[in-house]
């Protein structure tokens, strides 16, 4: 492979994840990443861009997002406004065409990493509406009769929290990887990337509590990797003695965010 992604100082990836990223790059296919919230799906795209020395373009998907939004927008209102006030160049429609994030990635003079973040937030037709563009790496602007072709095929990373099932036709075109929740060995490595000087005993006590909470079946929202990192920071900043971590659960609201979960944790950890 001409280019390959490796873990960075800020992002520790498993061997399986590294392999999936590099296969997607080699095969020139989108990489679809699923996993629990907080397992580093979005940060992966940042790490890939950093590792390969490429610009990152992020398309954040919302429930109202349409595929067209990522291609281009024709600002008819601005054109009408300019026409009313006698602005020059109103007849030049191209002035009122603004490329979306996919369009920006296609028009870039260098290869970029394009993150389509949380694709499952959009409606069910959204992924299918992007099939042609992601396959052919081009789209047509009807107003100016211009085809926008990718100067360099972007490295496309797509994340999903599995809120909706994605269409089979879309899945066939992707390389898929599910980010498993880190085991304790990998988690320690991740935490030490952020806090290399963390005290061994504090880290062990915090991780013991964290993983025990995640085993509780009646917890509605399991704490995530990013929340553990925040909690360890809070414990360090607060100067909390390690023997109090499990006994008193200081700053527990950093990792447990729902009232009913808080009651469950305090009851079971006593």
Image (tube, rainbow, N blue to C red):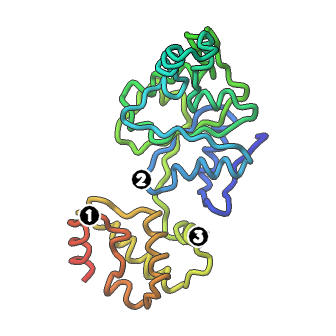
Residue indicated by mark 1 = 258
Q: Which residue does the image show at 57% across and 32% down from the upper left?
A: 101
Number of dots carrying numbers: 3
Q: Quadrant of the C terminus?
A: bottom left
Q: Quadrant of residue 61?
A: top left
Residue situated in front as seen by the camera: 18 or 97 = 97
Q: Residue farthest to the right? A: 2
Q: Position of residue 133 (x, y in %)?
A: 57, 22
Q: Residues within 10 Å of mark 3 (few under 14, many from 20)?
A: some
Q: Looking at the image, is mark 3 or mark 2 nearer the viewer? A: 3
Q: Find residue 23 and name its label.
A: none
Which residue has dot 2 on it? 36
Q: In which quadrant will I find the N terminus? A: top right
Dot 3 or dot 1: first in sequence order is 3
Residue 58, image x and y in percent?
56, 41
User: Would you say 214 lies left or right of 66 here?
Assistant: left
**Residue 128 point in image, percent of width and height:** 45, 23
Point out the residue furthest to the front here. Answer: 85
Q: Are marks 3 and 1 in contact (CB under 8 Å)?
A: no
- Tell which circle, 2 or 1, labels the residue nearer the N-terminal end: 2
**What kind of element bears circle 1?**
loop
For the residue labelled by badge 2, is the local secondary structure a helix, a strand or a loop?
Answer: loop
- Residue at the disc numbered 3: 194
Residue drawn at the location 55% of the way across and 66% of the way down: 186
């Amino acid at each position: 492979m001409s280019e390959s992604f490796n873990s960075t100082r800020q992002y520790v990836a498993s061997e399986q994840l590294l392999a999936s990223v590099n296969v997607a790059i080699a095969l020139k296919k989108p990489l679809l990443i699923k996993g629990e919230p907080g397992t580093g799906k979005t940060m992966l795209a940042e790490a890939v861009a950093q590792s390969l020395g490429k610009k990152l373009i992020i398309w954040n998907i919302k429930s109202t997002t349409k595929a067209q939004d990522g291609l281009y927008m024709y600002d008819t209102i601005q054109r009408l406004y300019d026409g009313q006030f006698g602005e020059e160049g109103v007849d030049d429609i191209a002035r009122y065409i603004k490329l979306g994030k996919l369009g920006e990635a296609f028009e870039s003079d260098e290869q970029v990493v394009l993150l389509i973040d949380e694709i499952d937030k959009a409606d069910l037709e959204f992924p299918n509406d992007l099939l042609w563009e992601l396959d052919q790496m081009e789209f047509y602007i009807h107003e100016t009769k211009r085809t926008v072709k990718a100067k360099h095929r972007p490295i496309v990373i797509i994340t999903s929290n599995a809120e909706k099932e994605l269409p089979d036709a879309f899945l066939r075109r992707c390389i898929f990887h599910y980010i498993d929740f880190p085991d304790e060995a990998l988690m320690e490595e991740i935490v030490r990337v952020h806090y290399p000087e963390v005290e061994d005993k504090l880290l062990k006590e915090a991780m013991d509590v964290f993983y025990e909470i995640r085993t509780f079946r009646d917890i509605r929202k399991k704490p995530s990797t990013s929340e553990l990192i925040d909690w360890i920071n809070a414990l360090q900043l607060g100067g909390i003695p390690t023997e109090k971590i499990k006994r008193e659960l200081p700053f527990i609201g950093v990792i447990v965010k729902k009232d009913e979960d808080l009651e469950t944790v305090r009851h079971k950890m006593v």
